[in-house]
Amino acid sequence: MTSSLLNIEAISQSAYSADPYPHFLGASFLREEAIPALRRDFPDITKPGYLTVDDVELKGSFRDLIRELESPAVTEVLSQRFGIDLHPFPRLTTIMKRSQPKYGAIHTDGPSKVMTMLVYMNDEWQAGEGGRLRALYNGKDFEPYACEVPPTMGSVFGFLRKDNSWHGHRPFSGERRVVQIAWIKDAKELDRKRRRNGFAQILKGIFGR
């Protein structure tokens, strides 16, 4: 794939492990020359948490980025990386700009998800270990961990959802820019997740949570 924004080879060349569940961690997924425009066009989101792309005003290079992330070429390289055909599964793309301390609790994701990829877009990270996603061995402990993801510009992390796909991060409050693309088992589950996400954002607007 020839891309003006993505270095798609960062996925195929990434560090991959099946321990404790299939996952990879790559760097420089965003082309260096594209970063200034992506930084400029990142959505001006004031609400905390993830919002679907339908709930966010997309413009310029960032709109192009979402199109490339949702392209068949990205799904294909992920399919090859994990040895599973991801093309039949619909995608849910969400965006976060602001994090709250309650986010990051250790979890596995629900069984409706097949695979998740996270693309980080922060210029630097000086928050110690807070906000650094970890691939974990159980649902209680942040240590030991199999992998820690620096949430800096162009870091890309992906994993297959399993009953033991524990992950999370220590609390962080503030700006934490990330795009998440999840491959969902079927369209019905995708619609349900979109409705639930929209309802959660309404509650946050009412109660300030």
Image (cartoon, rainbow, N blue to C red):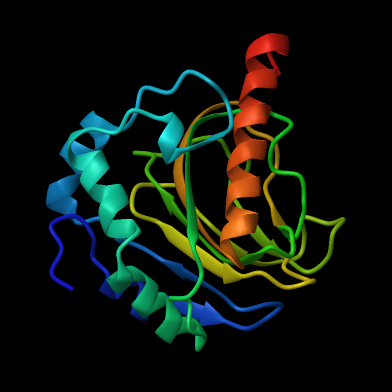
Q: Which residue reaches farthest bottom?
A: 83
Residue 100 seen from this side: no
Name the residue located 30 percent from the left edge and 61 percent from the top edge: 29
Name the residue located 87 percent from the left edge and 56 percent from the top edge: 140
Q: Is residue 146 left or right of residue 72?
A: right
Q: Quadrant of the C terminus?
A: top right
Q: Which residue reaches farthest right?
A: 140
Q: How many marks?
A: 0
Please provide percent x and percent y for residue 183: 53, 64
Q: Is residue 176 left or right of residue 103?
A: left
Asked which quadrant contains residue 61, the reply is: top left
Please provide percent x and percent y for residue 78: 42, 76
Q: Quadrant of the N terminus?
A: bottom left
Residue 19 seen from this side: yes
Q: Is residue 125 above or below residue 109?
A: above
- The residue nearer to you, when weighing 184 against 119, is 184
Name the residue located 37 percent from the left edge and 43 percent from the top edge: 121
Q: Is residue 33 above or below residue 163?
A: above
Q: Is residue 180 above or below residue 100?
A: below
Name the residue located 34 percent from the left edge and 47 percent from the top edge: 153
Please provide percent x and percent y for residue 106: 77, 51
- The residue nearer to you, when weighing 43 against 119, is 43
Please provide percent x and percent y for residue 162: 72, 73
Q: Is residue 54 above or below residue 159?
A: above
Q: Which residue reaches farthest front?
A: 188
